[in-house]
Image (cartoon, rainbow, N blue to C red):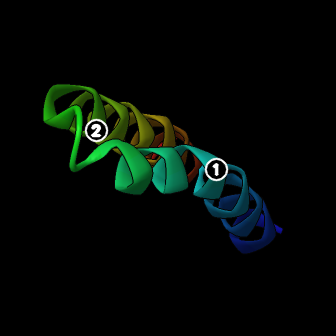
Amino acid sequence: MKYSIILLIFICSGYSLSYAKYSWRNNRRAAIGVTILVLLSVALPVLLMFFR
């Protein structure tokens, strides 16, 4: 069950990562910010699920 939730989080973050890829050439700061937000939005729930 935990792995399916993690997979769902990765699927939902795909849209944000595609925006980061799209904006990399014109606006690198926004792309880096979106990437950091995606990493945090994936890492925090995973850490809470496994170490709670």
Q: Amino acid at mark 1?
A: Tyr
State left or right for residue 36 relative to residue 41: left
* Residue bearing mark 2: 31
The residue closer to the viewer here, 31 or 43, is: 31
Per the image, label 2 sits on a secondary structure element best described as: helix
Q: Residue at x 25, y 48 (%)?
A: 24
**Quadrant position of the N terminus in the picture:** bottom right
Q: Are marks 2 and 1 in contact (CB under 8 Å)?
A: no
Instruction: Pinpoint residue 16: horizontal percent, then vertical percent.
Output: 54, 43
State left or right for residue 11 relative to residue 19: right
Instruction: Residue at the far left: name it.
Output: 29
Q: Residue at x 38, y 31 (%)?
A: 37
Instruction: Pinpoint residue 51: horizontal percent, then vertical percent.
Output: 44, 47
How far, Cα to Cα, is label 2 from label 1? Answer: 12 Å
The residue closer to the viewer here, 22 or 49, is: 22
Residue count near mark 1 (Cα–Cα under 10 Å), binned few <14, some 14–19, many ≥20: few
* Residue bearing mark 1: 15
Instruction: Residue at the far front: name it.
Output: 26
Instruction: Pinpoint residue 48: horizontal percent, then vertical percent.
Output: 51, 39
Q: Amino acid at mark 2?
A: Ala
Per the image, label 1 sits on a secondary structure element best described as: helix
State left or right for residue 34 relative to residue 16: left
Mark sitting earlier along the chain (2/1): 1
The dot on residue 23 is: none
